[in-house]
Structure formats: structure tokens, C-alpha cells
Amino acid sequence: MSASGTISEHLLDWYRSHARSLPWRAPPGTPAPEPYRVWLSEVMLQQTTVAAVIPYYAKFLQLWPTVRDLAAAPEAEVMAAWAGLGYYSRARNLVACARAVAELGAFPDTEDRLRALPGLGAYTAAAVAAIAFGRRAVVVDANVERVVARLFAIAEPLPGGKAAIRAAADAITPAADAGDFAQAMMDLGTAICTPRDPKCLLCPLSADCAGRASGDPARFPAKAPKKPKPERVGTAFWIERGGQVWLVTRPPSGMLGGMRALPDDGWSARGDGSGEAPLAGEWREAGAIRHSFTHFYLTLRVWAAEGEPEGEGEWWPVEDIENAGLPTVFLKAARLGLNFFSR
């Protein structure tokens, strides 16, 4: 048996006994779950923890049990259900993809055709092809990158080392059981080959691991130094009237596109806001919150007043603000406004 065959067999043997039980998974060696469930989970799991995804996944299946149900849902309702999960472009792509699949009649069953769907990048297309359809596909997420970089002692720093890592992952991906193999690699990275203090004594691949043989597996994968995130400043406005608060819908494209939000002063990832209020009034400062986005930090001041704003928006019951589907940054701001007026 080749070295690559030994690696895949050892890993699959380990997975049969140690696979995580997750709502979107089938046990090792059993028929695959339906593609809708695999795709939904993979989109949600991008840059998000399993613990955070599980309740959202259950909620989405309750609201939209099939891809056709999701395709028929108003985008605003999907965005509201997604609120708090972050990276909101994923939710917009989710709706677009569901509608494309509904039009096709079913999910395509090959990696290339899956890649043609809205919002499916290389990773998601490979994961759905392997897990839902049993196709041989090279599935590389952050966990797999770490495992492979250590297994082959790939020293080139990320992101430059990604090509070498993918080539090495391709070399050990088996023709059969590709879905189980992909999920086994993910589980190994989550439970054993962790970012810090890898548990090499428990690893089924320790005998094959060049990183372990080097004496310092945790130094792989090497990463280029992070650039400091810029700091941005903005203002959000809590406008209250008769137990209701004024909410707006953000433009469909751009940051937090299509989401309900408090009115703000036009801050963005590229610059600070103007600080200008949307109406004349007796504004009082309710406080400030700090929020971390992927590429910048935002300090958002919150000013509160009573008034009658102009333009498009909606009045929302103050006592139900937690259910308005606000993205996290605006929910934090809303809580300041809520607390201010309740004093």
C-alpha cells in the first residue's frame, strides 16, 4: 500500500470510531444526508463555530425544510433569521443559490456544476460533492490546511503555502469514501491536531507526520504577520416614539446589505461617519459600543431622541427589539438605546 493509501486508511479507521455526531451528518459508512442539509451546514460553518451554527441550522430547517421552501422565502425573512451569524453576504447568496437549485430541479452532483451555483466557492462545492454525492473532491478548510501542513511539514507561510497544501491534500484523498475522509480530516483538526498543543500521542497519523518528526508540529502552518486592523468611528441613532423605535433597511449591496438596522451616519469599512443626525431634535448620548469586523474595528456612538423621521423605514415595538433581526453591531447599539430610555 502507498504512503497516501496508508494515511487515508488510518484516518478512516479512526473516524469510524471517533466521528462527531452533528445534526447535518450521517454516521460513517451510512447513506449520505440530502444535499440541501449538507450545503446549508457548509455555508453556515464558513468562518463560524459548530456551536454557533447548530441552533441556526435547526431554525432554518424548521422554517424552510427543503431547498424549494428556502427558494420561495422573502429575502428579508432569511436575512432576519440569519441575524447574529455574521458575514451577511452568505445569507444573500444562500437565497440566490436556493432559487437557482429550485429552477434546476435539484442540486447538481459534480464539483464543477456545483461551483457554477451562486455563492459556492471551491471549498463549498468540493465539500457538497464529496459529502452529499460521494464524489472524489479535495476538500480544504482551515482545519484541513493545518493537518496537511503538519503532516508534510510544509513551511511556506500562508497564504503562499496554500497551493502546496492543496497538492498534498490531493495526494492523500482516496477515490472512495471521499466524504468520510473530508469529515475525518475536519474532525482530526478540531479534536487532535489543534492550533496549539496538538495531541500527537492520540493522532492516528502520528507515525506518518513530518511535523511531529521535526519536534515542533505546532509551528506549521506558518502564517505571514497580520496587518493591524484600522479603527473606524460612526454613530447610530435610536429614535423612539410611543414605545416604538425607528428602523431602516440597509441598501441591498454593501456592508450588512438588506438588513434591518438603526439609522446611522454613513460609516463604512473605508471611513468614519459624518456624525450628523437624521433629524433635528434633543439628542442625548446613550453610550458607545466597540465591534470587530473582519477587516476593521468600529467604535459606534449611540445617540437617542424622540421624533418623527422622514424617509423609508418602519416603527418596531421597543419591547420586541431582540426579534427584529438586527445584525450584531446594531443589536448592541439598540440595547444601549433601550437601556437609556428605560432609566
Image: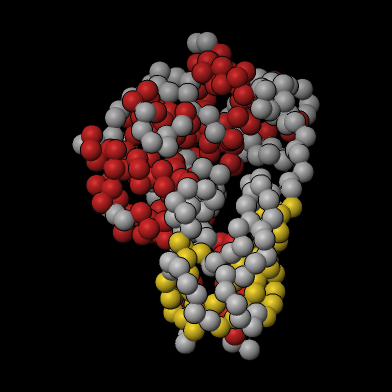
Q: Residue at x 49, y 84 (%)?
A: 241
Q: Could you say which quadrant of the image residue 342 lies in?
A: bottom right
- Residue 267, given in percent of the width and then of the height, sits at 63, 56
Q: Is residue 275 above or below residue 232?
A: below
- Residue 204, given in percent of the width and then of the height, sits at 58, 29
Q: Could you say which quadrant of the image residue 278 lies in?
A: bottom right
Q: How is the image coloured?
A: secondary structure
Q: Residue at x 54, y 77 (%)?
A: 239
Residue 189 in sight: yes
Residue 14 in sight: no
* Front residue of 166 and 83: 83
Q: Residue at x 56, y 44 (%)?
A: 47
Q: Is residue 9 above or below residue 52?
A: above
Q: Is residue 118 left or right of residue 183?
A: left
Residue sitting at the far top: 2
Q: Residue at x 72, y 40 (%)?
A: 196
